[in-house]
Amino acid sequence: IVGQSTLFSWDLAGLLQMAAMSGAIPADEMPSGESKIEIFTSVLNGDFNEAQEIETPADAQIVPAEAMMQSAETN
């Protein structure tokens, strides 16, 4: 059995401050509270050469890649 867990955490506070200072985000549109991106993965594999199952947490917010690309294309 092989197991691995990974946490990627990106605090966006500095990025948002730079955007506000440059005028890219108006001060009245700055988000309140904590702004961060976190991705946690946990893999446990004992059935080698079998299909892996991926479960989405019930409270996960899923943003389709197409929606992010569409937003970038309009700017």
Image (cartoon, rainbow, N blue to C red):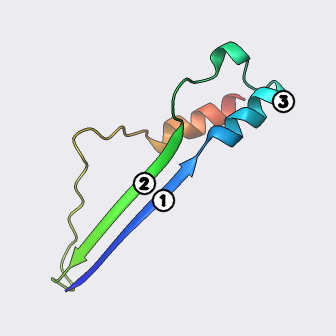
Q: Residues within 10 Å of mark 2 (few under 14, many from 20)?
A: few
Contact check, label 2 and label 1, Cβ < 8 Å: yes
- The residue at 24%/60% (across/down) is 54
Point out residue 3 in the picture as x, y percentages from the top left corner: 27, 79
Towards the viewer: 21 or 52? 21
Q: Is residue 48 above or below residue 70?
A: below
Residue type at mark 1: give it: Phe
Give the CA separation, mark 3 to mark 1.
27 Å
x, y percent for residue 65: 49, 44
Which residue sits at x=58%, y=46%? Answer: 11
Q: Within 10 Å of the Cα at label 3, are there few (<14), some (14-19), or many (20+) other Cα atoms?
A: few
Sooner in the amino-acid sequence: mark 3 or mark 1: 1
Q: Secondary structure at mark 3?
A: helix
Amino acid on which the number 3 mark rests in the picture: Ser
- Residue 22 disc label: 3
Task: Tell me residue 27's x, y (percent).
Answer: 72, 17
Q: Residue furthest front?
A: 33
Query: Relative to residue 3, is residue 22 drawn left or right?
Result: right
Front-most of residues 48 and 8:
8
**Residue 8 marker:** 1
Q: State which quadrant residue 13 falls in.
A: top right
Element type at marker 2?
strand
**What's the residue type where badge 2 is placed?**
Ile
In this rendering, would 68 be left or right of 29?
left
Residue nearest the viewer, comparing 8 with 47: 8
Q: How many marks?
A: 3
Q: Which residue is mark 2?
A: 39
Q: Quadrant of residue 16?
A: top right
Element assignment for label 1: strand
